[in-house]
Amino acid sequence: MKLVVINPNSTQTMTDKIIASARAVASQGVDVQGRTAHGAPASIEGHYDEVMSAAHLLREVQQAQAEGADAIVVACFDDPAIGACREVATGPVLGICEAGVKAASMIATSFSIVTTLPRSVPVIEELVRKYGLDHQCRRVRSAAIPVLALEEPGSNARQLVRAEILRAIEEDRCEAVVLGCAGMSDLTEWLSEETGIPVIDGVTVATKFAEALVGAGLKTSKIGAYAQPIQK
């Protein structure tokens, strides 16, 4: 099986981290390949960045499709242009927000999400409603850190995320926490140990979900909304 994990922003160090996280959980025989949306913004922090990254992301999806990808993971918690990606691809295309919150709903009766900047909170709240899980999501919280701070040694980003998770446990009384940024994927194990609560990373969960869908012989439906784009 060939799984392509795409970072929709243009920061290569984040791609490297994401791919390491995916490969760490991939089953034997799964070829995990990474792609970076070169030309996109350095980080996706809001609607503008999402729109500006979309064409670059779709280019990478088309290339992955041409090279025989069995499944694709879009590694940004805003699930940017996910519908368009599914129109282009044949195999399953998973967004890490959808994968993360659906995984949380299977292992806990409630969860909170900890993301980066406050401006991402309403975007994620809208996604949670779209996925039909707002009744289980106690709160979307911000650790008040820029996405790229997660790539900077000495930024104290991991401690800020840890502190926000501890507040979520106390104030939200949640039973699990979903990390609201692909750049947090390398913190999952440490945060679970530090906080004593299941901490879910959408990159690793989406990797395993993609394996399961391909293993079950499932592909993206081409009847209706995810049909191939109309040639003009």
Image: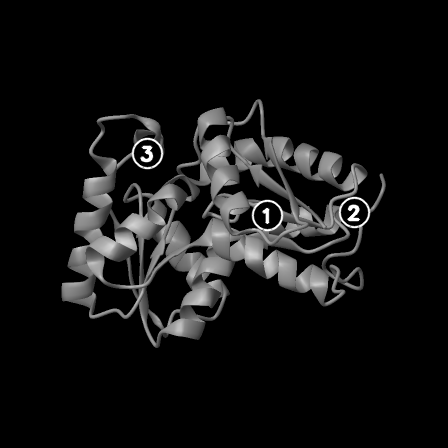
Front of the two marks 2 and 1: 1
Q: Amino acid at mark 1?
A: Val
Q: Earlier in the sequence, mark 3 or mark 2?
A: 3
Q: CA distance from mark 3 to mark 2?
A: 36 Å
The residue that appears at 67% across and 34% down in the rendered structure is: 60
Residue 93 to residue 68: above or below: below
Q: Between residues 32 and 140, which one lies in front from this camera angle?
A: 32
The circle drawn on residue 150 is 3
- The reply to whether residue 140 is visible in this rendering is yes
- Image coordinates of residue 152 in percent, x first then y, are 30, 26
The circle drawn on residue 120 is none
Tell me the residue that label 1 is attached to: 73
- Image coordinates of residue 104 in percent, x first then y, are 41, 67
Q: Between residues 20 and 109, which one lies in front from this camera angle?
A: 20
Q: Earlier in the sequence, mark 2 or mark 1?
A: 1
Q: How many other residues sit within 10 Å of disc 2, few (<14), some (14-19) or many (≥20)?
A: few
Contact between labelled residues 1 and 2, with CB atoms less than 8 Å apart: no
- Image coordinates of residue 89 in percent, x first then y, are 74, 48
- Image coordinates of residue 51 in percent, x first then y, are 54, 36
Say left or right for 94 vs 191: right
Residue 176 to residue 179: above or below: below
Q: Between residues 195 and 130, which one lies in front from this camera angle?
A: 195
Q: Quadrant of residue 154?
A: top left
Q: Amino acid at mark 2?
A: Pro
Tell me the residue that label 2 is attached to: 229
Say left or right for 169 vs 131: left
Q: Secondary structure at mark 1?
A: strand
Contact between labelled residues 3 and 1, with CB atoms less than 8 Å apart: no
- For this orientation, the residue located farthest to the right is 231
